[in-house]
Amino acid sequence: MINRILATATTEIHIARRNRWVLIAVVLMVIFSLVLSAAGSAPTGALGSDRLSVVVASLTSLSVYLVPLVALLMSFDAVAGEVERGTLPLLLTYPVARWEVLAGKMIAHMAILMIAITAGYGAAAVVTIAADPAAITGLAALWRLTWTSFLLGGTFLGIGYALSSLAGRVSGAAGLAIGLWLGMVVLYDLGLLAAVVADDGGTFTTRIFPYTLLANPADAFRLFNLTASQATGATAGVGGAANSIPQWQSLVSIAAWPLVSLGVAALSFRKVQP
Amino acid sequence: MTSTLTISQLTKVFGGVKALSGVSLSVCAGERVALLGHNGAGKSTLMKAVLGLIKPDSGEIAVCGAAPGTEQAREHVAYLPENAAFHPALSGLEQITHYMRLRNEDTSGAMALLDRVGLGHAAKRRIGTYSKGMRQRVGLAQALIGHPKLLVLDEPTSGLDPVSRRDFYELLDDLAADGAAILLSSHALTEVEARTDQLLILSGGTMAAMGTLSDLRREAALPVSMQITALNGYENDILSALPEAIRVNDVLQLSCSQDEKLETLSRIASLQGKLADVDIIPPSLEDIYSHFSRRDGQ
């Protein structure tokens, strides 16, 4: 079992390397992290926190968009690509379970994502600490951001596999992935913001709104990191709600989401007719 | 002989159309069975049912004593799909290594396997740069991994040149000699006739004929045709002695049923002094094939 999963993972790494996915993901994360650490380290002192914690707050806002995007880009082809190339029927005649195939792909994609995230955040940390050695106190916040980013990436990999299984065609899967990304990380917040404004402090804002934030893995990720770091004030908008939701709730959400999305992915892959 | 693959009364319906109805067959260890039929005759459907990729509506399939698609069955079955496709970014060697690991085989034999199908020189090139014939060879190489007990080969020689085809059938002979059961499909009877032990002709989802080539020849009972070339001036004599003959270009042609063959030949032989040449043309393999594959449906 382990051998078959690792065989799939090795092959997927070969493919991702050839297709430049490793390079693209790493370069994307490093460039954006460096730009943010250069721009984000300006308002120090006034907030009473170290430079790195402020950078972490900026990186959180960036990762909410970028990590799901990279994860979806790597995963949308996983099943639909096999179907469209015609490689799936042959693969399924091998003594390998479908979940093992998915697990192998997941390990490979997760490894690439972890390398890219670590490279990006690492570059930001190096630059920030080099400019101000006192910023080293912010490493705890950076570590928190790192492992939660892994979980966020895992969630969206699972979502990508599920979409890929449901779409059946690569083009359809790509469309669904971009649509879902736009919906979950961009439009969702805008919609909530509009609802909060319209509600003007009513039951929606006080009762339902916190749960809608927890229900979305991207929002739960942002909430958790902003509550945990002392830099809540450095961000505005939905982040302001962070104070009203206990930290354990957002932690449960970000920890549960990868399991849920991978479970859904495994179920949808089982339904694919070769 | 023990039967490696047994199918009885297999029926599969796709959206109201019967792709297979009541098909039964068996393939024993060491036996090479060719499945013939037009496009849409049900060959691929039958193979996919054997592999467990599709569920039949009724009927029984046993692969090495197990239900198709179970892990036990998949461990013993190798498949070569009709158009073998692989990820274009992988090299032939990486792809074969991957498949060997999925079968828990020692991957050090990967290069030898590629050499065996004549791909050793291109092993480290990406499959994306391969020709169709080369991809087919990768497909063949993966079907040889781990000494399968049953090989299911869907039009294995499509895209191969005549020399490669011969090599391919030699490979099959070796596999069958080692005790593997082989079920392969083809469009062309001419190609598989001398290379298989049994022929099955599917037509419109039903089994139209089954047996060795001579069985089929006998069953079809197609007329034999004869071509007679007369010596100069004797043509009319021959035509009056053999009234059923007709003149086509410069030769006289006649055809007779298998039963009348010897009698007709002796009548021709009695005209010996007037004949330049006689050719006997048995029904061609294509004639036999069309006879069976048109009997139902078309």
Image: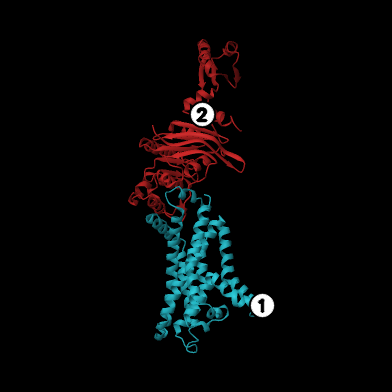
Chain colours: A cyan, B red
Q: Position of residue B91 (x, y in %)?
A: 42, 54
Inspect the image, locate mark 1, and give the three-letter code of the amino acid beneath it: Ala
Q: Position of residue B33 (x, y in %)?
A: 45, 34
At mark 2, the secondary structure is helix
- Inter-mark Cα distance, 1 to 2: 81 Å
Viewport quadrant of the C terminus of chain B = top right
Between A183 and B133, the residue placed more toward the observer is A183
Tell me whether marks 1 and 2 sit on the same chain: no
State whether residue A52 is above or below residue B288. Answer: below
Relative to residue A184, is residue B86 depicted above or below?
above
Residue annotated with mark 1: A198
Crowd class of label 1 (few under 14; some 14 to 19; many from 20; radius 10 Å)? few
For the residue marked with disc 2, what is the amino acid? Leu
Q: Is residue A79 visible?
A: no
**Residue that badge 2 annotates:** B285
The x and y percentages for residue A38 are 48, 81
Viewer-proximal residue, B145 or B289?
B145
Instruction: Tell me whether the residue at label 1 lies in contact with that at label 2, contact meaning CB atoms closer than 8 angstroms.
Output: no
Report the quarter where the N terminus of chain B lies: top left
